[in-house]
Image: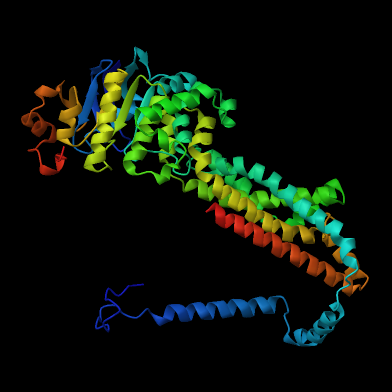
């Protein structure tokens, strides 16, 4: 469970990225966060695992404050939160296996990790994760030999190997074509239902958001302007979130 | 400078881009000339001396031929020692350069004082030429290869760390961000987010430093820091020019061989 208690974030230059956000996300939800770029979606997502600091309020993960967590507590809390990025963020020169195994570093001692000594079980976990995203046969390819969609699935496998309770995905399909977008979103949906992992996903395609979300949160200028089940997110609601009518480029189409 | 936006197939009818001003390049030439003349005047450079010295240079070259071929087997062990000094010096230097470069890279440690301090240390090391370092270590640890190894260590530390921290600063921040997100502490974060991205460039700089160290190691003997340089100086002192040219040829072969191998490996690392 993720709880935001009156969270605000003001950048040093005075820009307000989050304005008094107060929401709760239950386990197993598939939440899609929408809004114009600069509306605070990314800040919202990155404040959950504290890649970004907030300036006011508190964020609780399973009733434990990540806002005040320090040192090993923060590392342990982050270990339970998987993250998927727009640009995959894989080490391009390393093998797929190595990238997936890097999701396991939080479980072992620093000394062990300096020498890269992963136990056998970790390799099984990594293989299983790769199998779940249909990438098992690429385990020993170099990451930069893969297509964008394949790389994104490897990064999903990394989050799975991490054995996180929830996955944050920041524009996971923004640099993919429509077909691979569908594959990656299907993977996330399957992981959500099969493993009951909570998903919080930033998207800018409205039709993709509607197809996969169980709940939609709309941001506008750092404020939550809509929060409700996907059925209630009508075109009028999207116009409210975007501050204008829905435009062609906000639809992926072809799905 | 302006770039003419016309295609090169058609003759340029563009009159917008004026030719670059001549005064600037003229000024540069005059400045460089003044600098050269001033420097020559300051160190009492004389063409006369150069002219009287030239025939001597010719007779020296004549003395160097032919090399004393029997001397080859005798200098093999100091040549080997030279290579071993370079191997040890580069290895120790590289081992120290790795963490120092990490500390100096601003994308690894955000604290400005850490990067500033490491860069000051780095620059200090780099200002000392290897011969001076060797002379210092000979004064401290006495004559021998140990002083040479220490000099080469500091020398290669300076080279590797400088090149390496700049390439560390140019890496992709994505994997580092991903490692923060999986809950890695600083060391794990470096091992998995940084190291795999920079390992090949590190190896490349390491080999480059080794190439330079082989050459540097060959002269360190001049100040008593071990290796072939000592033999070179002794033979010069006794006017054994045949032996001197043996050493020169031997060193040349070794340097060329190592340069060749190292360059090949570095190409593979790209």
Left or right of residue B211, residue B236 in this image: right
| Position in image of residue A160 (x %, y %) | 38, 25
Residue under the point 34% across and 13% down: A62
Of the 4 image quadrants, the one containing the C terminus of chain A is top left
Residue B264 visible from this viewpoint: yes
Residue A42, by quadrant, is top left
| Rendered location of residue B172, percent (x, y) | 43, 44
Image side of residue B237 versus residue A169, left or right: right
Viewer-proximal residue among A225 and A28: A28
Could you say which is closer to the camera, residue B45 or residue B221?
B221
Residue in the image at 76% along x and 87% along y = B51
Q: Quadrant of the N terminus of chain A?
A: top left
In this rendering, the count of numbered labels is 0
Q: Is residue A219 visible?
A: no
User: At 40% across and 27% down in the image, what residue appears?
Assistant: A129
The residue nearer to you, when weighing B170 against A157, is A157
Residue A218 falls in image quadrant:
top left
Quarter-of-image position of residue A91: top left
Question: Where B107 falls versus B267 (above or below)?
Answer: above
**Horizontal relation, residue B153 to residue B208: left or right:** right
């Amino acid at each position: 469970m993720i709880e935001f208690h009156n969270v605000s974030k003001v950048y040093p230059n005075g820009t307000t990225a989050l304005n008094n956000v107060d929401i709760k996300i239950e386990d197993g939800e598939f939440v899609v966060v929408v809004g114009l770029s600069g509306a605070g979606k990314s800040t919202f997502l990155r404040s959950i695992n504290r890649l970004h600091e907030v300036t006011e309020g508190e964020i609780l993960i399973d009733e434990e404050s990540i806002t005040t967590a320090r040192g090993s507590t923060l590392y342990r809390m982050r270990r339970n939160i998987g993250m998927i990025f727009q640009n995959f963020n894989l080490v391009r020169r390393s093998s797929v296996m190595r990238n997936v195994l890097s999701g396991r570093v939080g479980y072992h001692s620093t000394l062990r990790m300096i020498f890269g000594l992963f136990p056998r079980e970790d390799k099984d976990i990594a293989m299983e994760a790769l199998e779940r995203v249909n990438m098992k046969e690429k385990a020993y390819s170099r990451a930069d030999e893969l297509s964008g969609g394949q790389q994104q699935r490897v990064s999903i496998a990394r989050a799975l190997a991490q054995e996180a309770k929830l996955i944050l995905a920041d524009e996971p399909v923004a640099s993919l074509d429509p077909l691979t977008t569908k594959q990656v979103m299907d993977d996330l949906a399957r992981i959500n239902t099969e493993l009951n992992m909570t998903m919080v996903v930033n998207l800018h395609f409205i039709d993709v958001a509607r197809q996969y979300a169980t709940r939609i949160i709309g941001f506008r200028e750092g404020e939550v302007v809509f929060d409700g089940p996907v059925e209630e997110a009508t075109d009028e609601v999207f116009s409210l979130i975007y501050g204008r009518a829905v435009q062609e480029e906000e639809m992926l189409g072809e799905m | 400078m302006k770039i003419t936006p016309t295609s090169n197939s058609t003759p340029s009818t563009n009159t917008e881009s004026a030719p670059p001003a001549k005064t600037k390049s003229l000024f540069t030439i005059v400045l460089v000339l003044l600098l050269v003349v001033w420097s020559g005047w300051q160190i009492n450079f004389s063409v006369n001396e150069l002219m009287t010295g030239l025939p001597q240079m010719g007779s020296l070259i004549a003395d160097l031929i032919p090399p004393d071929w029997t001397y080859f087997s005798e200098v093999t062990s100091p040549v080997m020692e030279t290579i071993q000094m370079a191997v040890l010096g580069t290895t120790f230097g590289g081992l120290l350069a790795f963490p120092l470069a990490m500390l100096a890279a601003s994308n690894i440690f955000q604290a400005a004082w850490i990067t500033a301090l490491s860069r000051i240390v780095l620059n200090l090391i780099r200002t000392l030429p290897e011969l001076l370092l060797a002379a210092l270590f000979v004064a401290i640890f006495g004559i021998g290869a140990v002083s040479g190894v220490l000099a080469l260590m500091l020398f290669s530390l300076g080279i590797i760390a400088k090149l390496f921290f700049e390439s560390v600063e140019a890496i992709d921040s994505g994997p580092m961000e991903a490692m923060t997100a999986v809950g890695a502490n600083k060391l794990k974060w470096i091992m998995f987010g940084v190291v795999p991205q920079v390992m090949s460039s590190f190896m490349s700089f390491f080999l480059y430093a080794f190439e330079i160290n082989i050459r540097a190691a060959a002269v360190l003997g001049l100040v008593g820091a071990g290796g072939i340089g000592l033999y070179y100086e002794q033979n010069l002192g006794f006017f054994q020019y045949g032996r001197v040219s043996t050493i020169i040829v031997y060193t040349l072969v070794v340097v060329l061989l190592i340069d060749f191998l190292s360059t090949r490996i570095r190409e593979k690392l790209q």
